[in-house]
Amino acid sequence: MTAIEIARQVFDTEMEGLRELRESLDTHFEQAVELLRKTLRQGGKIVVTGVGKNLHIAEKISATLASTGSTSVVLNPSQAIHGDLGILASPDCLMALSYSGESEEIKNLMPAVRRLGIPILAVTGNPESTLGRLSQLVLSCKISREACPFGIAPTTSTTATLALGDALAMTLLRTSGFRREDFAKLHPGGAIGRTLLLRASDIMRTGEQLAVVSADTLVSAAVVAMTSARGGAAFIADGEGHLEGIFTDGDFRRAIAAGDGDVLSRAVSGFMTRNPVSVRPDSLAVDVLRLIESRAIDDVPVVDETGRLVGSIDIQDLPKFKVL
């Protein structure tokens, strides 16, 4: 069997496990969501724990929850019985991950958690296990087989547990009214935060970087204005500043290529694009980027609610703001 065939076999086995998990979802999932929502409404946090590979899965689930508006931390069960149990407070709930439900570290932790009166949500492949019996609510992540040929290394089971955690996190996100802007606020240092928080007004060109001419301006003067502004377009506005059209370097090249020898001495109104697509100052930078990509354009005028030109966005500026 080739390496690719082995890899595809692993994918097939894990996808089979995910399909089984998907079909097994029942009212226990809804009850789990309600438990977590109640915890968050009361000002508590979702504490996720696991041992071995499941501790890594717990870290991922907790990180996903926290980044999507559901306060969450990770509890190492080995450290918990040596003082870290203080992470837990009365409004919290504990999500305990153990496929067998018989991990010694998890079993040792459960009595202490129950004494604190903290509700326990077990995620296990064995609902009748010790973990299952000591928990208020059990979510089954039972799968038919691991992708490991010996059935030993956690593979399909950890994938199923991770997917179940993602399902819980995304359900909480969608039922809590969590918005794209909220997501950006929790990721201020990354590309996601930049593209979701930046507005057109934050990245638009204004003042001397904005080439604005009237409709009767000669093409030669419009080209000089574009060059002075170091931009790829001149924007045509009336006496009150309302946007009438756009004249780009592409328009200029096409006019020259068409053999119009006196193009420089003619009015820019004869070559401009009238009523160009535009955006408002409060438009999200990510939406401006989608517009630029979908329309295959390089320059977008920014207008206020009355249609007055207030700025422009040049595609060559986007890498500087790390939007591209």
Image (spheres, rainbow, N blue to C red):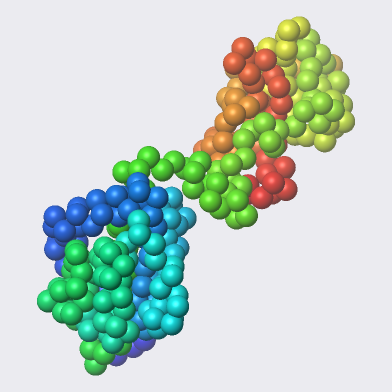
Is residue 42 visible in this depiction of the protein? yes
Q: Quadrant of residue 150?
A: bottom left
Is residue 191 visible in this depiction of the protein? no
Indicate whether 72 appears above or below 188.
below
Q: Quadrant of the N terminus?
A: bottom left
Q: Residue at x 66, y 37 (%)?
A: 298
Q: Quadrant of residue 7?
A: bottom left
Q: Is residue 208 left or right of residue 238?
A: right
Please state the horizontal and vertical placement of residue 244, each as a whole percent of the image.
66, 14
Please state the horizontal and vertical placement of residue 268, each as a whole percent of the image.
75, 17
Indicate whether 242 appears above or below 186.
above
| Viewer-proximal residue among 198 and 79 | 79
Q: Is residue 203 left or right of residue 111?
A: right
Q: Residue at x 78, y 20 (%)?
A: 212
Indicate whether 181 appears above or below 156.
above
Q: Residue at x 62, y 14 (%)?
A: 307
Please state the horizontal and vertical placement of residue 229, each as a whole percent of the image.
83, 31
| Viewer-proximal residue among 165 and 35 | 35
Q: Is residue 135 left or right of residue 210?
A: left
Q: Quadrant of residue 231?
A: top right
Q: Residue at x 31, y 43 (%)?
A: 175
Farthest residue to the top: give it: 239
| Viewer-proximal residue among 192 and 289 | 192
Figure label count? 0
Farthest residue to the front: give it: 115
Please state the horizontal and vertical placement of residue 259, each as a whole percent of the image.
74, 26
Indicate whether 170 appears above or below 23.
above
